[in-house]
Amino acid sequence: MAVITNQTLIACSPEEVFDYASDNRNELEWNPYAISVEKITDGPVGLGTRYLARWKGAPSALEVECVEFDRPRRWAVVNGGPVAVRATGTIDVVGDRTRLVFEFDARPSGWFRLVFPLFMLVMRRQRKTLLTDFRDALERRVGADGDAR
């Protein structure tokens, strides 16, 4: 098990941050490593929502499932594969901004244990940059609508 935790302050409401972050389809806007994300369950995004997602370097698409959903405070998704990941987002207000704390908890299995230290080195470098990209994408989107605080 290895956990990477990063945080950022965003000039949007907690609800805006939560709604954008908890819908994995939005990852295509801010994560250059995301190739495709398709929602494969019916209804609104929430507990039990599943996606089929693919990232650069992954041999195939993975199913991602929302396993925690407490709007606008916290959500979590999990996926299997050679590296089982639980990604958790926690939101609170700091002054006039919303703080997003993002936790990436990875657990390798099988042959992937051999390359896992290298994988985590790459992920640690990417996670901080990706959270900045997330913040910038959301602020642009909300700012375009005139709703940012």
Image: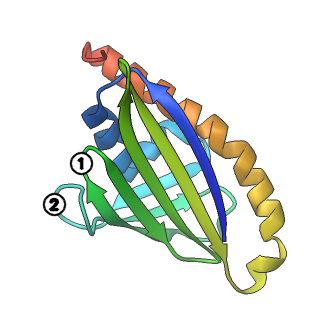
Could you tell me which secondary element the residue under label 1 belongs to? loop
Classify residue 129 as left or right of residue 147. Answer: right
Whichever of callouts 2 and 1 sits on the residue coming sooner in the sequence is: 2
Residue with the most extreme bottom position = 110
Where, by quadrant of the figure, is residue 95 drawn?
Answer: top left
The residue carrying mark 2 is 43
Residue with the most extreme left position = 43
Compare residues 50 and 22 and report the one nearer the observer: 22
Q: Is residue 104 above or below residue 1?
A: above
Q: Is residue 110 above or below residue 114?
A: below
Residue at 26% over, 13% down: 146
Where, by quadrant of the figure, is residue 15 drawn?
Answer: top left
The residue carrying mark 1 is 71
What amino acid type should be assigned to the residue bearing mark 2?
Answer: Gly
Q: Mark 1 packing: few (<14 Cα in 10 Å), some, or many (20+)?
A: some
Q: Which mark is residue 36?
A: none
